[in-house]
Amino acid sequence: MSINQDKFGVFWYNLPEICQWQAADFENKAAEFAAAGVNIVMTFSCTHFRWSYYPWRHIINEALKKMVKACHNHGIRVVEHHSSHLTFAPHSRRDWDALKRKMVIRNGSLDMFPGLREHLAMGDSEIAPGVFLSDCRQIDGRTGQPATTGYGGYAHCFNNPHFKAAYLKTLEDVYAAGVDGIMTDDVQYFGEGHACTCKYCREKFKAETDFDLPVPYEWYTFTGNYSNPAYIAFLKFRVRSTELFQRDVNKHFESLGLKLLRPNYATSTFSRNITGYPFEAAADLWTHVFQENMFSSVIRSAWPSWSCDAMHRSAIARKYSVDPMSMFYPTRYDDYYFSWALSRLWEHLLMATPEGGDLNEVETIFAEYEKHHPRLAGEAQPMAEVGFLQPRNSMDYAFDPVESASRPFHVWLQSALFTNTRASIIFEEDPLSIWQQYKVVAVAGATMLADEQLELMKQYVKSGGKLLIFGKFGIYRPDGSLREHPEAVFSFNADLVDFHPVEKGVFAWQNHKIELEAVEESCSLSNISGDCQVVAQSCSGEVLGVSACSGKLLWLAGGIVARRPAAVHYGVIVSRWGSDPDKAVPAPAYAADYIKNYPGRILKAFINDVPQISCSDSRYITSCYCTGNDKTILLHLVNIGKVLARPPETISHIDRFENFMPNAPANAEDVIVEFKLPDKNPVPQQVRAFSPEFTGEKSLSYSVEGNILAITIPAGTFAGYLGLEVK
């Protein structure tokens, strides 16, 4: 664990910084970042859609150059961040009003450059001799016309050689400013998943796959047809195209003799990759992997889904030996502190920014704590009790990707979260040795699996691992063709009965008996044969789950609510770009109790072991980590009491996080945390508690019985966040 840990900040350069600031102004701001403990800044700007400001790029780069010089004076590296290809294209009064609001929020103006309005309305930059930006637009397969984006503009194609060459040329001007890194944002296809079908994509797709992309009047018999190999090939082609573009950025700057930081982020990866985003495909390029916890997502509703995505970033970071990070958009002390606490819970680095500015004044308050208590970050081992197989192919290339793949996966991930079960992510390409790091592996939503993956599951169980499967699994091969009886690899057969209502039932596992609620959309099993035993049934006798392989395999085909939004907690969107960003909206359905009491209890019963960490008070979410040699063990507690709302409550961006306000009341009663010590770990000599809420450290009393460490946190210790170090 390095005491000189990277700390990211966000340096906004907008109208004042670009058009008015002098060197001294940049120097003062750089000093602020240094005082807040920042050693890397990532640039954000009202000119993020840089192609819309193409005629003024030299002015923007001149400001960037001043910023870089000032930051370097304070030992701060600069990562330039901008959209690689998106533009604004306002056509209506509504478009112009929306763009004006965005510029105001980002401290910019439609008049910040002479002629900017006219350029946004009618301009079409010549990006190479005889080549105009409009020649490079992504084409929507439905219409044969330029694809539009959700940002009120156009996108441009990564397979267009003129566009790629022009973009790399603009990057040379950015590099000349002395930047230390580059984040080429938005490398995605737009048009709601129907782009790109420009002539370059058509030619390249034909050359690579021998398939032809259809013309517009044939498009609707093509798109969404997961049984058509050409459609599957098109989806994969888009990811290869964006991946190659990102790799070409690296090749280009390396050819110039540069070695640059390349942080990159994604929002939720546990959904259909409708844009062909290459976050995982090009993951070996990224020097930091992080998640953007969206600006317009209401934090109160979003934090459970963010917590699950955090497992993914951590797993990617471990795979490539880099640091994971999370980005939030707090605006006050209390939502900053809650965001900060989540990042500590996940062992992520933190990057926080309100739109248009910074929170350096608040970050400075936490800087001293960070100095004395650095994060494990990329060195963190999650001490996971269960590994979850990410059903990547099922979410991207299989029929019904949301309800049959993504949603069930979220339900079971959140069952681990809400029961304080330590978990991590397994990737589909991971070998058996990775699976064997986990005593239990959960497979939920994996409708598409290769034969090799089914064989790997069999070998995992034969080697002593325990495998929990939920719902449909392996019914598709990677080419989209159907597979019958994937369960046969485990020496039994059953017919999978497709979604239908099932009555209440019972799950019986060893000495556990869990009553199940009725489910409107559930699979069940019939015509069962071979070496397996029924472990879950509805009251009418429908089989919902079986066990096989001497109790090492549990296939729960149904009996759990997993096919509707109310089954999980997700981020409610209230646009902060609109005219009423602070409006209150109805809270979504409260799912945490169901998740804990049904999939959560089933998961615990199947693990059937002493929990890695547990807490006497259900208001606290916990986590624990060690380094590879087990010498450093960190435990985290975050108070989520009163954070998740229940209907008919409302939620908004301005809701206060009561336990994270300055001088919030501390815990009224003792809290007991039990932690299972690693094998061969010596008896702890000390347990120390830390929090930004008090100065220094507190030694806590504890007891050890066998390999269980019981820690007492006295009443009055903390309100929002507490870190524990076991030595």
Image: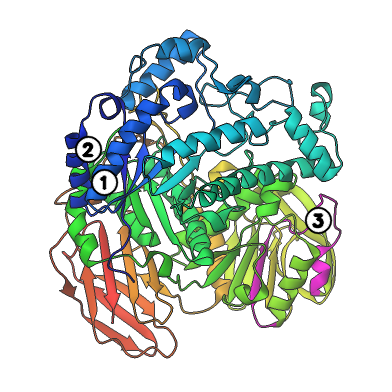
User: In the figure, 508 relative to 597: above or below?
Assistant: below
Label 2, label 3: how many angstroms apart (C-alpha)? 56 Å
- In the rendered image, residue 491, in percent from the top left (x then y), is placed at 83, 75
- The quadrant holding residue 727 is bottom left
Q: Is residue 148 above or below residue 450?
A: above
Residue under pointer 3: 477
Residue type, mark 3 in image = Arg
Q: CA distance from mark 1 to mark 2?
A: 8 Å
Q: Secondary structure at mark 3?
A: loop
- Position of residue 719 measured from the top left corner of the image (x, y, whole percent): 22, 57
Q: Which residue appears at 37% of the width and 77% of the height?
A: 675
Q: Quadrant of residue 710?
A: bottom left
| Element assignment for label 2 | helix
> What amino acid type should be assigned to the residue bearing mark 2?
Phe
Q: Earlier in the sequence, mark 1 or mark 3?
A: 1
Residue for point 86% across, 39% down? 211
Q: Are marks 1 and 2 in contact (CB under 8 Å)?
A: yes
**Residue 26: assigned label:** 2
Q: From the viewer's side, name the closer residue of 89 and 244.
A: 244
Callout 2 environment at 10 Å: few (<14), some (14 to 19), or many (20+)? many
Q: Earlier in the sequence, mark 2 or mark 3?
A: 2
